Image (cartoon, rainbow, N blue to C red):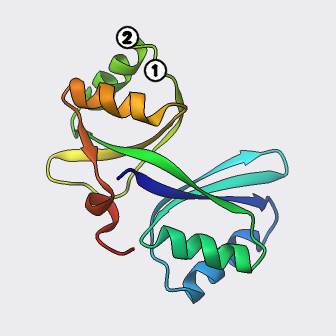
Amino acid sequence: MNIQQISVFIENKPGRLQHVLEVLNSGHINILTLTIAEINDFGILRMIVDKPNTAHDILRKENVTSSVNEVLGVGIDDKPGGLLRLIKCFAENKLNIEYMYAFTQKKGDEATMIFRFEDIEAAKNLLIKEGFNIMKKIDIIGDQE
């Protein structure tokens, strides 16, 4: 199963991020990694959490605009050129990345990158064919949900 990511649309104002974090804390949701992208007066908070479905439910109950999206976790060699090799593979196969960010946890000798693609299954099939390590949900968040 692919990794589920929570995306939250928040105003770029003091206290808005705090509110989201308080809601997640009230549901005992552990954030494993996150990134924020700013778009004018708003931001998109993207997170990998231990219980994505629960997180989405409690955010909705608190009127926080959120969605659940599938992303790929890809293991890359944690050395110079590791990410370059992966990006070259995407370019050579004309596979466009919608966005990416680093996962904060290392697995053995690999770093983990999180990717979103328009066609996630095509990306996954290509990466498997090229010998990249696709992380499973259980590799990232364990057996929480």
Where is mark 2, residue-wise? Answer: 92
Amino acid at dot 1 = Leu
In the picture, measured across the screen, residue 53 lies left or right of residue 136, that is right
Do residues under tags 1 and 2 come within 8 Å of each other at their CB atoms?
A: no
From the top left corner, tell me how far across and down residue 137 is, in percent: 33, 58
Residue 129 is labelled as: none
Height in image: 3 above or below 89?
below
Return the x and y of residue 76 as percentages of the image width and height: 25, 37
Q: Kindly give the residue lying farthest to the right in the view shown.
A: 41
Which residue is depicted at the point 85% across and 51% down? 41
Would you say 70 lies left or right of 128 here? right
Residue at the disc numbered 1: 95
Disc 2 marks which amino acid?
Glu
Between 2 and 114, the one nearer to me in the picture: 2
Secondary structure at badge 1 equals loop
Relative horizontal placement of residue 27, taking residue 125 as reference (left or right): right
Query: Does residue 110 lie above or below 107 as drawn?
Result: above
User: In the image as oriented, which residue stretches furthest toward the left?
Assistant: 108
Image quarter of residue 77:
top left
Image point 45% across, 76% down: which residue?
30
Image location of residue 105, percent across then percent down: 30, 58
Distance (Cα) linking label 1 and label 2: 8 Å
Mark 1: few, some, or many residues within 10 Å (few <14, many ≥20)?
some
Query: Which quarter of the figure is the C terminus placed in?
Result: bottom left
Q: Which of the two residues, 118 or 7, is positioned nearer the viewer here? A: 118
At x 41%, y 54%, the residue is 3
Secondary structure of the residue carrying tag 2 is helix
Q: Judge the density around disc 2: few (<14), some (14-19), many (≥20) Cα neighbours within 10 Å.
A: few
Disc count in the image?
2
Q: Which residue lies most toward the top here?
A: 92
Q: Is residue 126 above or below residue 141?
A: above
Image-based side of 64 in relation to 132, left or right: right
